[in-house]
Amino acid sequence: MRVYALLFLAASSIVGQLGCGPSPGGGPSPGGGGSCPDPADPGVRYVSHDPVECTLIDFACSPPEEYFGGECGCGCIGPEPASCPDPRDPGVRYVSHDPVECTLIDFACSPPEEYFGGECGCGCIDPEPATCPDPSDPGVRYVSHDIEECHLIDFVCAEGQTLFYDECGCGCVSPETVVCPEPGTTNVLYVSHDPEECMLLDFACSPPERLFTNACGCGCIGPELPVGHAP
């Protein structure tokens, strides 16, 4: 009995000096130095909680897992889980939160959106936080603030305007601040001063007049009359 006791003390002394044995690559063992990996963490997998047993068993960790060993025991630990894109961020659009469903569905992201996928789900994300066009800017005309509705409606922008389509909605924006055509001038004919009503109207301008539609309304505007020319 005394011989067994001495053998156990000798083994304990070796374990105390070496812990669970060196980690692969000769690096420090995660969880050593009094900090035990949390067994409740899904990224932590204990092979044994007994440091003595850890010296007797042979196992390998599957990349990207890493070996850990010490007074807590030994096992494998995975990298920190990736943070999920915040669904409250206006630049994030989830198509599905189910990774399995993500493997079955086919969708495309609208540039400059980029695809993302993983254990959080899948969808599209803007490379930078989006800045919504200012609806109070007379050079900005929203057709809809509902991105789902934007998928269903068809519209065109007036000459010189640029179409925008993002999580803010969709519509048209002018490169510079719009100066509303003065309704009192002879070369301007307003069909409506209501931008929302303008989306529902169908009208054409007679050349050389051209159509205008913006936050001021919509209508037809002709070329500037020469100075001194009587209307």
Image (cartoon, grey):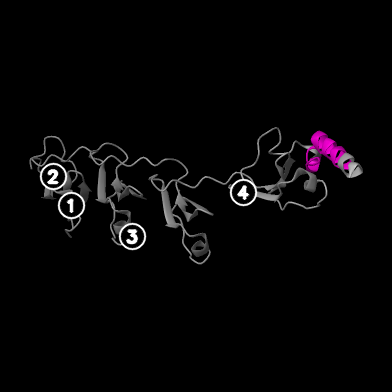
Residue name at image x 25 percent, y 42 percent:
135
Q: Is residue 11 magenta?
A: yes
Residue ID for mark 1 = 196
Q: Is residue 2 magenta?
A: no
Instruction: Report helix, strand or loop for mark 1.
Output: helix
Instruction: Report helix, strand or loop for mark 4.
Output: loop
| Sequence-first disc among 2 and 3 | 3
Point out the stretch of residues depicted in magenta.
7-25
Q: Is residue 96 left or right of residue 74?
A: left
Front-most of residues 46 and 142: 46
Circles 4 and 2: CB atoms closer than 8 Å: no
What kind of residue is marked 3?
His
Residue ID for mark 4 = 43
Neighbours of disc 2 within 10 Å: few (<14), some (14-19), many (20+):
some
Q: Which mark is residue 204?
A: none
Farthest-out residue, right: 3
Q: Nearer the viewer, mark 3 or mark 1?
A: 3
Q: Nearer the viewer, mark 4 or mark 1?
A: 4
Farthest-out residue, front: 1
Instruction: Report helix, strand or loop for mark 2.
Output: loop
